[in-house]
Image (cartoon, rainbow, N blue to C red):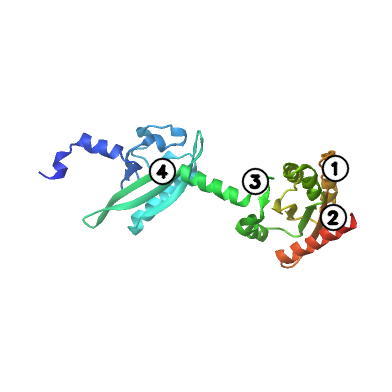
Amino acid sequence: MQWSDALGYEEVMTFLRSTPANLFFKDTECRYLFISDVRTFFPYGEGQEEDVLGKTDLEIWSSEEQARFYYEQDQKVLATGKGTSFITEVPRKDGTAYYQIKKNPVVLEGKIIGIVGLIGDITERVRLEKQAENWAIHDELTGLYNRNYLKVKGAEQLKGAIMPITIIMGDCNYLKRVNDAYGHEYGDLLLKRVGRVIRENLPPESVALRMGGDEFLIACSHFSAEEAEQLIERLHGELARQSDDRLKLDVAFGYHTVTEGPFDYTAVYHAADRDMYRNKRKNR
């Protein structure tokens, strides 16, 4: 007796429905013939087998873009005889879910008779990766971006920036004095407050970074020199209002604006930095 003779229909279906990943079959018209776990198939876990079986993705999904993408992937498998793999997002009650979908052609006697696919829930992995990426480009103390942001995403963002582009540099004037007088806990609190003031007054199309220590950077797209001076004045006023006897939020700012031509970040950064230090020496 061959192994296939030992399994009846119900047993085969039980095996299929017990697969660790969600398994599905489709015919050559891209219609679902079988799906092992319909609960993880639909957004929010709502749906029945009758909502899926005998239908294509074009008939199932409310998002036309999503449905079209799934359907086109099926057609690609049938046309090329090659498998495909991609990651898709689905809304769920506990947030966005991420699924990796793999599809292969089913070939019998040299002819494609359908598609077999696996839907793997990789939500936890993707969330951890996104969390790690978020930590890698954010300053834990202030919540602003950190220097790594420039390496990871900054260049891409600056490519899409619109002239004039302004870089504003800031350096806290009294951090060492606060650390020496009250301890590093108060120094950290000073940096947090400065970061919050910058974040709450950040113009549209701008990003703010803590570059390290007591140094901050604001990169502004479509932002003139006049607007930079107005922003710096507003920041000075807000920092003064949020100061107290122990924590004087006083920051020296400098800026440089490029109105035309290629944007050289390094040159603009150093020009803004020099302007900031000129202002720092002037106000001592």
- The residue under the point 75% across, 52% down is 214
**Badge 1 or badge 3: first in the primary sequence:** 3
Residue 256: % across, % down: 80, 61
**Badge 2 or badge 3: first in the primary sequence:** 3
- Most extreme residue toward the left is 1
Between label 2 and label 1, give the one nearer the viewer: 1
On residue 57, which mark appears?
Answer: 4
Question: Which is more toward the observer, 141 or 12?
Answer: 141
* Above or below 140: residue 159: below
- The residue under the point 70% across, 52% down is 209
Disc 4 and disc 3: Cα gap in Å? 43 Å
Between label 2 and label 3, give the one nearer the viewer: 3
Residue 206: % across, % down: 72, 51
Q: Mark 3 points at which residue?
A: 140
Secondary structure beneath label 3: loop
The answer to the question of whether label 2 and label 4 lie on touching residues, with beta carbons closer than 8 A, is no
**Badge 4 or badge 3: first in the primary sequence:** 4
Q: Residues within 10 Å of mark 1 (few under 14, many from 20)?
A: some
Q: Mark 2 points at which residue?
A: 226
Identify which amino acid the numbered label 3 is placed on: Glu
Question: Which is more toward the observer, 182 or 174?
Answer: 182
Identify which amino acid the numbered label 1 is placed on: Ala
Between label 1 and label 4, give the one nearer the viewer: 1
Q: Mark 1 points at which residue?
A: 240
- The residue under the point 79% across, 64% down is 271
**Badge 2 or badge 4: first in the primary sequence:** 4
Between label 4 and label 3, give the one nearer the viewer: 3
* Above or below 183: residue 212: below
